[in-house]
Amino acid sequence: MTAISKIRANYDQLFIDGRFVASSLGTEPVLNPATGENFGVAPLGGKEEALAALAAARRAFDEEPWPQTDRNVRADAMQRLLDKVRERKEEALTLMMLEMGYTALQAEFQYGLCDVQFAKAIEVARKDPTKTLPFIVTPRPDGTNAMGGALVTRDPIGVVLAITPYNAGFLLTLVKAVPAMAAGNSVIVKPSPFTPLQTMMIAEMIAELDLPPGVFNVVTGGADVGAILGSDPRVDMVSFTGSDKVGSQIMVQGAPTLKKCHLELGGKSPLIIRHDADMERAVMSGIFGFVHQAGQGCSMTTRMLVDNRVRGDFVAALSDAVGALKIGDPFAQDTFMGPLIRETARERTAGFCERALAEGATLVRGGKRPDGLDKGFFFEPTIFDNVANESYLGQNEVFGPIAAVVGFDTDEEAVRLANQSDYGLGGAIISRDAGTALKMAMKVRTGQISINGGPGGFHPDTPFGGYKKSGLGREWGEEGFNEYTEIKAISFPAGN
């Protein structure tokens, strides 16, 4: 891991129109959530910077050659960026740990996912999107026949606004911006105010490329800046990752101009543990489902649906395993879970615990700030048993380390409970009967679901996104790449 002293943590300029420019609003501090103390400085964007970025991005798409540039040339530029990202991996990991409070293991996981999806986007970008449709014969009124065919191709959509969350700033800046740029679009990134430095680091790397000015821009700021950008008619598409509440506001902002909204939103994903589950695997899935990233993940399986025949054994084993985990300094080698992002997140998590107790759930472990961790925004991994699926905890996303255990008696009931949710983002099933697990998975209304851990990681070709309030559209793979394009059909007669 790169020494903290070697990390650039102070930026006083935004990246707009191919160059770094000072913000009219100056800078603001960046907090380390593990200590609650300032460790860096980031530029603060406002209306002036948002309007400058809009003009630059529009000009880059309408007047620069980037959209018409050969797809392999654009892919080559993205490959050079990937090379730079790989060269600065250790810096990126350290910034993730400082800004987000992630442990080394969690930062490595996010970086690995970023690397895989970055490479996949470049691979897709090199493919010719054009396909030839079969010729057809059409009768004419005079008794003769016409014959002709058609092509279907894809064009870049225009100016893309990418709004990224604090829990995956480095990953999602690249997962959104790279396919968008590779498809020929220009991009404005607005990172979370909590984690801007990772995006500024990416801007540094892009500044070293020979991209036309305005193809990539970064504007920091709060919801007001997002509203300025998201409502402007010069933006053709908004790609947002965050809560369903904010996602609906983005749709409202974009409605007057009918701009495309690509939304990856919240979840309350089910982990279904059947009576025949391998208990060790079930416990490991349970730990990852709510402790990883301190529960700050949209598709985490925090709603654990457990067959009542094994529920007692599972809860006891999960509690024992969680009790052995170290919570604390993300830079300590034996730390398994770091802090939440801010004090408001810690208070929100505590509020969920109070409400769960009031609704009759059983607190098995946790429910408070860990002993000895008075600084930072830490909260103990918390397990509730006897949770009613329809309760507040059973239905709402915490974005904190709380597991809600719900019992069931039959496979049919498990599927019904899994689908009894406004969300449909992720899910998992643990069972020694893979065939039955597959049949159940086919019935669960969710964008992705794994059986017994899946392939051991995220498949690079798997599209990521959800049903219902979990969003619109997909990221990753070919489907995710194509979200940043428009489909065009060109028909023609045979001959002249």
Image: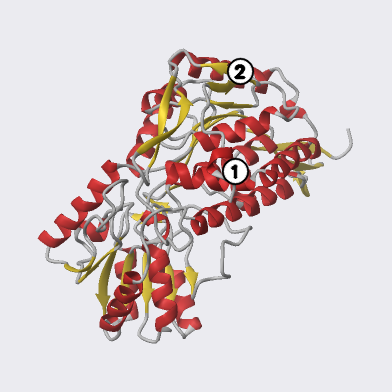
Specify the quadrant that holds the C terminus: top right
Residue drawn where x is 43% and y is 84% of the image:
278
Q: Which amino acid lies under the numbered mark 2 shown in the image of this protein? A: Ala
Q: Nearer the viewer, mark 2 or mark 1?
A: 1
Comparing 213 with 337, the one in front is 337
Q: Earlier in the sequence, mark 2 or mark 1?
A: 2
Q: Quadrant of residue 343?
A: top left
Label 1 Cα neighbours within 10 Å, binned few <14 / some 14-19 / many ≥20: many
Q: CA distance from mark 2 to mark 1?
A: 29 Å
At a point 56% along the width and 65% down the height, the residue shown is 457
Secondary element type, mark 2: helix
Specify whether residue 255 is in view. Answer: no
Q: Find disc 1 in the rendering and name its residue.
A: 91
Q: Is residue 138 visible?
A: yes
Within-10-Å neighbours for mark 2: few <14, some 14–19, many 20+: many
Q: Position of residue 340 (x, y in %)?
A: 34, 49
| Residue 302 appears left or right of 149 | left
Side (left or right) of 425 relative to 92: left
Q: Which residue is mark 2?
A: 56
Residue 48's place in the image compared with 229, above or below, is above
Q: Residue furthest right?
A: 495
